[in-house]
Image (cartoon, rainbow, N blue to C red):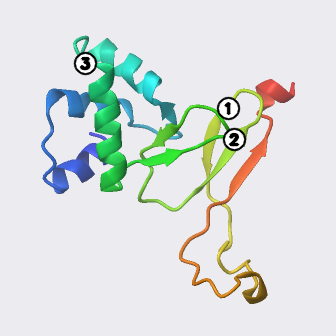
């Protein structure tokens, strides 16, 4: 059982067969699928699942805070089920591959007080970009 399914069950979220298959597709490490990729994989398991159901389910999961939407510079949004474990993203500027990374240090602490302009900063998102081994080769 995936961590996402466990979290959804713990919240009492009604797991229809469609919702369950979407959550199952999002299971795993370094999962950052587009909605179309989620639909294609879900349809392999449940052929009658509609694209609209997948989009609606992903929207609900984002609203619940159980999945994070990741935007990657003009590419399709991707969906990350690793919503409850602090991490950053490493994105290949060639093919768009995404990996979760866990750098040391606190990006909030790295922002000097004079650069906060009076903001009370609650979170920081750092994205690392470069070429993956396949694209760099």
Give coordinates of residue 98: x percent, y percent: 63, 38
Mark 2 or 3 closer to N-term?
3
Q: What is the secondary structure assignment of the residue under circle 3? A: loop
Q: Tags 1 and 2 in contact by the CB under 8 Å rule?
A: yes
Q: Mark 2 and mark 3: span between their CA atoms? A: 30 Å
Quarter residue 83 falls in? bottom left
Q: Nearer the viewer, residue 117 or 109?
A: 117
Check residue 131 in the rendering and tell me which mark sits there, or answer none: none
Q: Mark 1 and mark 3: span between their CA atoms? A: 27 Å
Check residue 91 in the rendering and tell me which mark sits there, or answer none: 2
Give coordinates of residue 2: x percent, y percent: 31, 41
Mark 1 or 2 closer to N-term?
2
Q: Residues within 10 Å of mark 2 (few under 14, many from 20)?
A: some
User: Which residue position holds label 3?
Assistant: 49
User: Which residue position holds label 1?
Assistant: 96
Residue found at x 33% / y 21%: 51
Residue found at x 21% / y 27%: 18
Q: Tags 2 and 3 in contact by the CB under 8 Å rule?
A: no
> From the image, which quarter does the N terminus lie in?
top left
Residue found at x 87% / y 24%: 137
Give coordinates of residue 34: x percent, y percent: 49, 30
Quarter residue 124 falls in? bottom right
Q: Nearer the viewer, residue 80 or 24?
A: 80
Residue found at x 27% / y 19%: 50
Q: Indicate whether 36 appears above or below 111.
A: above
Residue furthest front as drawn: 117
């Amino acid at each position: 059982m995936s961590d996402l399914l466990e979290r959804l069950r713990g919240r009492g979220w009604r797991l229809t067969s469609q919702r369950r298959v979407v959550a199952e597709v999002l299971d795993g490490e370094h999962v950052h699928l587009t909605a179309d990729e989620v639909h294609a994989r879900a349809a392999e398991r449940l052929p009658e699942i509609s694209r609209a159901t997948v989009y609606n389910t992903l929207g609900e999961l984002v609203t619940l805070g159980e999945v994070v939407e990741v935007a990657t510079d003009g590419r399709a949004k991707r969906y990350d089920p690793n919503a409850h474990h602090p991490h950053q993203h490493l994105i290949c500027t060639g093919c768009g591959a995404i990996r979760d990374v866990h750098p040391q240090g606190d990006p909030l602490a790295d922002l000097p007080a004079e650069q906060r302009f009076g903001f009370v900063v609650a979170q920081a998102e750092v994205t690392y970009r470069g070429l993956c081994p396949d694209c760099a080769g």
